[in-house]
Amino acid sequence: MHPALQAVLTIVIGVGGCVGYFWGANQILDKLIFPARGAHIARNISRANMVRPWLFLFPALFALGLYLAYPVVATLWLSLTDRDQGGAFVGLANYRQMMGEPKFWEAMRNNMLWLIVVPAASTGFGLLAAQLTDRIRWGNLAKSLVFMPMAISFVGASVIWKLVYDFRPEGQDQIGVLNAIWVALGGDPQTWLTITPWNNFLLMVVLIWIQTGFAMVILSAALRGIPEETVEAAIVDGANPFQIFFRIKVPQIMPTIVVVWTTITLVVLKVFDIVLAMTNGQWETQVLANYMYDKMFRAFDWGVGSAAAMVIMILVLPILIWNVLNARKEMR
Amino acid sequence: MKRSFLSGAAMLALTAGTAQAADMVFAPGEGGFNWDSYNAFAAAHDLSGETVNIFGPWRGDDQQLVESVLVYFAEATGAEVSYASSETYEQQIVIDTEAGSPPNIAILPQPGLIADLVSKGFVEPLGAETEAWLKENYAAGESWVSLGSYTGPDGESALYAFPYKIDVKSLVWYVPENFEDAGYEVPETLEDLKALTEQIAEEGETPWCIGLGSGGATGWPATDWVEDMMLRTQPPEVYDQWVTNEIPFNDPKVVGAIDEFGWFAKNDAYVAGGTGAVATTDFRESPLGLFASPSQCYLHHQASFIPTFFPEGTELGLDADFFYMPAYEGKDLGKPVLGAGTLAFITKDSPGARAFIEFLKTPIAHEIWMAQSGFLTPFKGANAELYGSPPLKKQGEILLNATTFRFDGSDLMPGAVGAGSFWTGMVDYVGGKSAEEVATEIQNSWDGIK
Amino acid sequence: MDNIAGTKSTLTWAVHLSVALLVALWLFPTVGLLVSSFRTGEQISNSGWWSSFSAQERQAPAIRVAGAERQEGALYVIEGELYPDTGAAVSAWGTSSRAPEAYGPGDVAELKDGWALSVDAAGRYRLTAPQSFEGERLPRIFSTATAPPEFTLDNYRSVLFGTTAGTGVGQAFLNTLTVAIPATVIPILVAAFAAYALAWMEFPGRALLVAAVVGLLVVPLQLALIPLLQLHNDIGIGKGYLGVWLAHTGFGLPLAIYLLRNYMVGLPRDIIECARVDGATDFQVFVKIVLPLSFPALASFAIFQFLWTWNDLLVALVFLGTDDDTLVLTARLVNLLGSRGGQWEILATSAFVSIAVPLLVFFAMQKYLVRGLLAGSVK
């Protein structure tokens, strides 16, 4: 069969199957198992309502469990065993070995830096871009342009920025923008990516450049969702635009800001393509995800690689806890 | 076109039609090729209806070249051949074998990685017959057999991989006319090379272009330097002890070799852009300095593949040439040659996979590629007259004149060292750290994986 | 939709200016790559892309005299042009790498064996000798020339129609679409139901599930590859489209659920409560009220998931395989790069070939985004 036809067919089957599942399961629940009529109508309705969430959740939980939770468990197991000894249980030996490596601590330190700078800068720029572009006529065009980096793969982005940071020896034409400007201002050409600790920030710029578009799109949606009455009331009260922005708008979209912030945080924890493509963690730019990749696929040390992955998982705990607390609050 | 009994197989191959089914670049029966062996192979193998999946490291132009060879295999056997590669082929092959969906044949340039796959039981042994064939038919056959032999999951050492296509690494590239313009001579000894380096620097020019940049693999070109220097300062036995870690990485002998490299790379006057530029200059762009005007450098140390990255239209032998990276006259270590190469091995057994290994034993599998470009072989049965260009022939001669041939040490070391700490260590070294410091760090990483 | 707040004109100008600055800053690197994709590899590595718009004087690498010889009386002559078709103006030239600017245009250089070479300002050269050039090595000409801007479509030609990739770009395009569309639609549907349940339905363990979803967001993809491919091989899916779709669905779900749930939680409670009081079931509430109101969130996630699947290389390679007839566009483009890594001109061009569709999607979806937002705000 032609792949295009196959694709169309599968979209129909897949989507149809999903819709069919949700609708059909719902029907069966309401009409057959716990019909909302007859002698036990009240009991049936409450029972149906107890089952229904799980009907809605089942496909998602199944896929999540299979594709993400199962690998996590497998990884946890791998991190406690040694493949070279036929998968024997070695306790925390892998973790101990990892803690003994200076590269690991370098990765930890850099990751912390990434975790602070990238989400803050992306969200900040995103909020700024969202607020500003919402107020001008060519705002949509501007938005598209700022969003464009999102459409470029990480590898493509790394290429773009490598060109920006490129270095040519003194006396030759610089082909990197940064060095060209630097030289024009009277400096000597620099090999930017080897200058610690600033090279870390230069790598972060790449991710900020990509993620700002994401933050902007989501935050702009949130800004537009603010009831106009609140803003109008503030204008009537004589508030200036800055006050309106920071006192009225920002607090109202705080939940969305938090979502954007955490989402970008999660991207940061996982990102390794940029580091891999631009420095491969050399010149003290190692990050955890790249460290893990290094251990898994270059050193074939799955024990330590898995242990590094578990550390990444642990780093997300604060977000996890915060989310649980938040969800609890909502329920009250 | 001449078609004898082959036409049947050819028709089959055509109807089976791989997506890239290119034409046969050399018509069967013509030229100095060993067509007899090919015809005999074709007569002995019929794999109609079978698919042979081959996974290799070659992409871009190299992919076209390897596919031009595979066409002959497909036509001879009637099998459908599917070649694939990937930018992250090392990772891909690990995932595929671990998960149980490997190709029939995998071809990799890293013996260290193959050893790892063998020890986990993912590779099929090639058998005693092939081992005997290699010993018999490859120049210095023993060394090739030992290169392809690994310890299997049963603890026994056996031949698992078939060396096919090698690169010579001990080459220095230069522009002959720039040498003439400046009145330089091609050095015959390492002493002369150092003297030439000093002379060029004294004249206010820059002798070397050295670039270690290679994205995620940044640092590897320096490992070739160090290996070449190892072979030029120590006997080959010490080299062997080094790559197997029988002597530690921070042994004074190794540290000395690293510092030999440092003599060239860590002198601002000797490298284009200064030492600071060495680690960040991309190895693909580094040789371009030879061709710039005014020339940025006069010498470039790199393996035989590098002309791919020369400016378009560069004619080897005329616009650019190479000489053998010379040895110390005073050390009496002969003429050591450093090389690298790819090895083919069976990751999913099938008649087609076995037939492919048999195909690699025919001269034609070597001749088709060597008659085009970028292919060297130690196979004595292949017609050396067919080398596609004089430079290739010259590289073949360097290979033949070698008193010692050693495989790229970083490829033989465990991945964590040879494709990890050795690379990064070299970057740190040109970045300012001392050879002892760097070597100790690399040794620590080696200790870590034991 | 604009001008909700202050309307002072200076402020408006400031806004315009700062947006322009922001856009320029964000666009600049990409423009660099775009311009580079129209230049040759040699140009890219020799001069900054910004200088490609103006005439540039530079010392060019040596060009060897070439052409057929003819006889003029006693002299053998070879004539040719250094810069055919470009109209570069030569200001100095030479024949030795040590003195590349030894002569001016029109000068005659005496070489060995009575050879004479001259180069004029337009780059036309003339080499003469008393004997035939047969079998001789012809001299090189170093030149310093001012070349007008020059762009080429060759990169695009070789990426789209070249022999290595050309045979497969169309097929690869289709393969990518076959992967990307279902891998975008299915997770959205599955996630929307789950997100609704997590946002608006009461059941024990809800908070725990939300937390679990967030936790799964950080699972590094590389971890999951081997166990999952193993699983696919064991249950008989093997390598194929079904496997990729499932994998992308699995990997995309946490973000989908997370974003959608957060959006849905923010929907006005009254509307949903009212509907429930009116006797609507959860299924009806979801389909008739929540789903339409969540359109903007659905659209934004669709964009992200589509971009992700479109740009993905790793998942496709692992779960779809590397056969020619299933290679996706990213994999096809990667194969263009030589075995030993990338060349800038090809990287730049492939980046723009692969970026075209995601951008189109974004521009197209953006309308829906806005429309969805407007619909959502009508209360």
Image (cartoon, coloured by chain):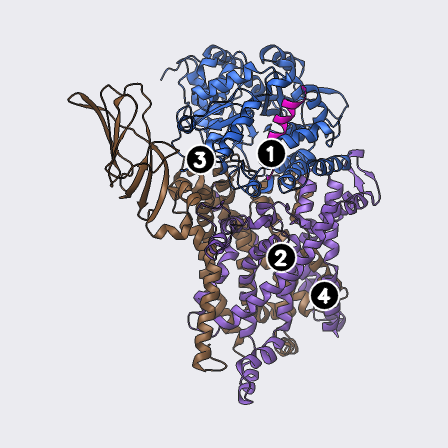
Chain colours: A purple, B blue, C brown
Q: Mark 4 belongs to which subunit?
A: A
Disc 1 residue crowd, few under 14, some 14–19, many 20+, Cα 10 Å: many
- Pointer 2: residues within 10 angstroms few (<14), some, or many (20+)? some
Residue A179, above or below C328:
below
Q: Which residues are magenta?
A: B218-235
Could you say which quadrant of the image residue B342 lies in?
top right
Q: Mark 2: which secondary structure?
A: helix
Which residue is identified by label 2? A21
**Residues beneath discs 3 and 4 located on the same chain:** no
Kindly identify which chain the residue marked by label 2 belongs to: A
Residue C338 pos. (x, y %): 49, 35
Question: How far apart are labels 1 and 3 at the CA level?
Answer: 31 Å
For label 4, the SS is: helix
- Contact flag, marks 1 and 3 (Cβ < 8 Å): no
Vertical position of residue A163 compared to residue B390: above or below: below
Look at mark 4 in the image and give the residue it sits on.
A323
Please state which amino acid type lies under the numbered disc 3: Thr
Whether residue C153 is visible here, answered yes or no, is no
Residue beneath label 3, please? C164
| Residue type, mark 4 in image | Asn
**Which residue lies under the disc numbered 1?**
B222
Q: Is residue A51 above or below residue B433?
A: below
